[in-house]
Image (cartoon, rainbow, N blue to C red):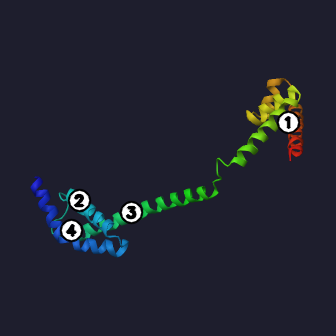
Amino acid sequence: MQREASKTIGELSVRFRPALMAFFLRRIRNFSEAEDLTQEVLLRVTQKSATLDTGRPDAYVFQIAANLLRDRARRNNVRDTYLSGTAVLEENRIEERDPDRVLQGKQSLVTVTNALREMPERTRTIFILFRLENLKQHQIADMLGVSVRTVEQHVVRASLLLRQKFGEES
């Protein structure tokens, strides 16, 4: 059985390898890829040899070859799209450990922390629930037993205080 399969591969290789190599080389111009694709075609034809009309399988062989080229083009397209996307991300990336940015971040954090400490407790609580915990204003109002308008006023008051503190820092 295995001898038959290797005999079939050998016969197919003698018959189709030159034509398949030429077919692939005209389209992709890369010898090693053309060789790999040729091998793949011969392998697939051998695997399907039971259902193949052994008289003239030319059309079947070249249909497999065309399908492999289409698959290769799709894979390359997906790969290129992914690589171009990551290249754009790399271009837009900012140096993460820039000492000036680290210092500026630490100073901003100190400013925010000090501003939060200076706020009245209720304003600070509402602001933290709204901005950091991402709760909706109506949820905060229900939780604290106040009106939504009161929550809005506290959020505005806290935002103005923070804006003022950052203005003083500059």
| Quadrant in the picture for residue 87 | bottom right
User: Where's residue 43, x and y in %?
Assistant: 23, 59
Looking at the image, residue 25 lies above or below residue 1:
below
The 10 Å Cα crowd at callout 1, few under 14, some 14 to 19, many 20 or more, is: many
The 10 Å Cα crowd at callout 3, few under 14, some 14 to 19, many 20 or more, is: few
Mark 3 and mark 2: Cα distance apart in space: 17 Å
User: Where's residue 138, x and y in %?
Assistant: 80, 32
- The label nearer to you, 4 versus 3, is 3
Mark 1 and mark 2: Cα distance apart in space: 69 Å
- The label nearer to you, 4 versus 1, is 1
Name the residue that disc number 3 marks. Answer: 72
Name the residue that disc number 4 marks. Answer: 57
Find numbered disc 4 in the image and state the secondary structure of the residue it sits on. loop
| Quadrant in the picture for residue 41 | bottom left
x 87%, y 36%: residue = 158
Give the side of residue 28 with respect to residue 82, left or right. Answer: left
x 30%, y 74%: residue = 23
Name the residue that disc number 1 marks. Answer: 155
Residue type, mark 2 in image? Leu
Give whichever of discs 3 and 2 has the lower sequence position: 2
Residue type, mark 3 in image? Arg
Mark 4 and mark 1: Cα distance apart in space: 76 Å
